[in-house]
Amino acid sequence: EFDLLALLMPNPGRVLTHRQILTSVWGPAHAEDLQYLRVLIGQLRGKLEDDQANPRFIQTEPGIGYRIASD
């Protein structure tokens, strides 16, 4: 969880692709393992968001990746 937040936090508002995140957090061998990423995002949202169905902090760009809200 820390590695994912450390990757997203310095880039508020910037979309990081699934591949960028997976490669940075788990390494190049896991660049296609989206389920790892979805589970980790869900865990973080459970800790950070008041309403996981309408996330304010970790936002999804469908088919692309995720971003940390800039405001």
Image: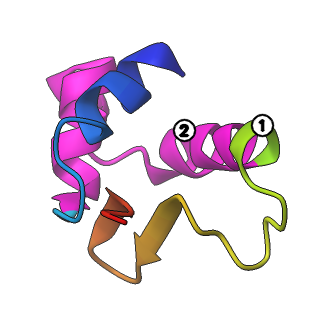
Q: From the viewer's perspective, is residue 10 above or below residue 55?
A: above
Magenta stretch bounds: 16-45
Indicate left or right for 8 with 1 as reference. Answer: left
Residue that mark 1 sits on: 47
Coloring basis for residues: rainbow
At 60% from the left and 37% from the top, the residue drawn is 40
* Mark 1 crowd level (few <14, some 14–19, many ≥20, 10 Å Cα): few
Quadrant assignment for the N terminus: top right
Q: Residue 51 lies in what quarter of the image?
A: bottom right
Q: Residue 54 lies in what quarter of the image?
A: bottom right
Quadrant assignment for the C terminus: bottom left
Q: In the image, which disc is placed on residue 39?
A: none
Q: From the viewer's perspective, is residue 1 above or below residue 64?
A: above
Q: Give the residue type that dot 2 points to.
A: Tyr
* Mark 2 crowd level (few <14, some 14–19, many ≥20, 10 Å Cα): few
Percent coordinates x, y for residue 9 in the rendering: 30, 37
